[in-house]
Image (cartoon, rainbow, N blue to C red):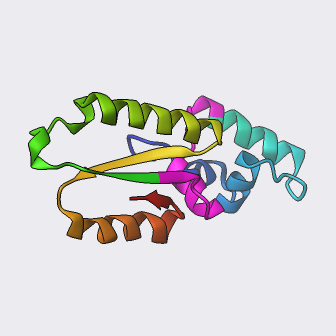
C-alpha cells in the first residue's frame, strides 16, 4: 500500500478479499458476506482511517446532486466579482437554497463564454450535474 489516500483496493489486497466485498461493506450491502469478513473489513477501514471518495460515490450513483452555476467574470469587476455585494448575496442565497434541497453548489466564474460548454460537459457527462447559466 502506497502513501496517501487509502483506497478500497488497498484494503482488499491487505485482507485478501475482493474490492467488491470491501465496497459492499462500506455501502452496507453485507447480506452475502460473512460476519467475520465484515468485521475484519470494518476494523481495517477504521485502523487505516479510510475516507470515502465523494467523487467515486457520486459517480457510482450517477447523480451528483451538484447544481453548477456560472457567473460572468466580466473585466469590469477586475477579477473580484465575488466581492460585489449583489453577486455575493446571490451566491449566498443560492447556496442556502441548494443546500436545503440536499444538493451541492459548484461555482464557475469566467468571462470566456466559449469555455462553458466544455466545462459543463465534463461535469454533466461524468457526474450528472445540473447547470444554471
The stretch drawn in magenta includes residue 56 = yes
* Along the line of sight, the residue nearer the viewer: 3 or 78: 78
Question: Image point 64% across, 42% down: which residue?
Answer: 102
Q: In the rendering, at what x and y percent does residue 67 appear?
A: 50, 52
Give the left or right position of residue 103, taking residue 73 as reference. Answer: right
Question: Image point 47% across, 72% down: which residue?
Answer: 125
Q: In the rendering, at what x and y percent does residue 97 appear?
A: 57, 37
Q: In the rendering, at what x and y percent does residue 71 appear?
A: 30, 50
Give the left or right position of residue 126, taking residue 115 as reference. Answer: right
Count of marks overlaid on the render? 0
Give the left or right position of residue 132, taking residue 51 as reference. Answer: left
Q: Is residue 81 above or below residue 126?
A: above
Q: State whether residue 9 appears in this view.
A: no
Question: Image point 65% across, 42% down: which residue?
Answer: 101
Q: Which residues are magenta?
A: 46-67
Question: Image point 80% across, 44% down: which residue?
Answer: 38
Q: Is residue 105 above or below residue 12?
A: above
Q: State whether residue 133 appears in this view.
A: yes
* Along the line of sight, the residue nearer the viewer: 17 or 131: 131
Q: Is residue 70 above or below residue 95?
A: below
Splitting the image into 4 quarters, where does residue 92 fall? Answer: top left
Splitting the image into 4 quarters, where does residue 39 fall? Answer: top right
Give the left or right position of residue 11, taking residue 88 as reference. Answer: right
Q: Is residue 100 above or below residue 127?
A: above
Q: In the rendering, at what x and y percent does residue 62 appear?
A: 61, 64
The stretch drawn in magenta includes residue 11 = no
Q: Dividing the image into 4 quarters, which one contains the C terminus?
A: bottom left
Amino acid at each position: 500500500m502506497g502513501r496517501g489516500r487509502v483506497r478500497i483496493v488497498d484494503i482488499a489486497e491487505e485482507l485478501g478479499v475482493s474490492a467488491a466485498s470491501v465496497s459492499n461493506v462500506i455501502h452496507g450491502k453485507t447480506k452475502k458476506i460473512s460476519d467475520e469478513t465484515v468485521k475484519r473489513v470494518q476494523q481495517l477501514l477504521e485502523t487505516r482511517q479510510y475516507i470515502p471518495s465523494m467523487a467515486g460515490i457520486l459517480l457510482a450513483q450517477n447523480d451528483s446532486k451538484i447544481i453548477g452555476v456560472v457567473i460572468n467574470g466580466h473585466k469590469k469587476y477586475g477579477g473580484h466579482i465575488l466581492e460585489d455585494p449583489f453577486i455575493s448575496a446571490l451566491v449566498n442565497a443560492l447556496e442556502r437554497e441548494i443546500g436545503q434541497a440536499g444538493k451541492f453548489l459548484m461555482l464557475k466564474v469566467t468571462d470566456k463564454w466559449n469555455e462553458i460548454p466544455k466545462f459543463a460537459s465534463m461535469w454533466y457527462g461524468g457526474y450528472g450535474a445540473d447547470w444554471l447559466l
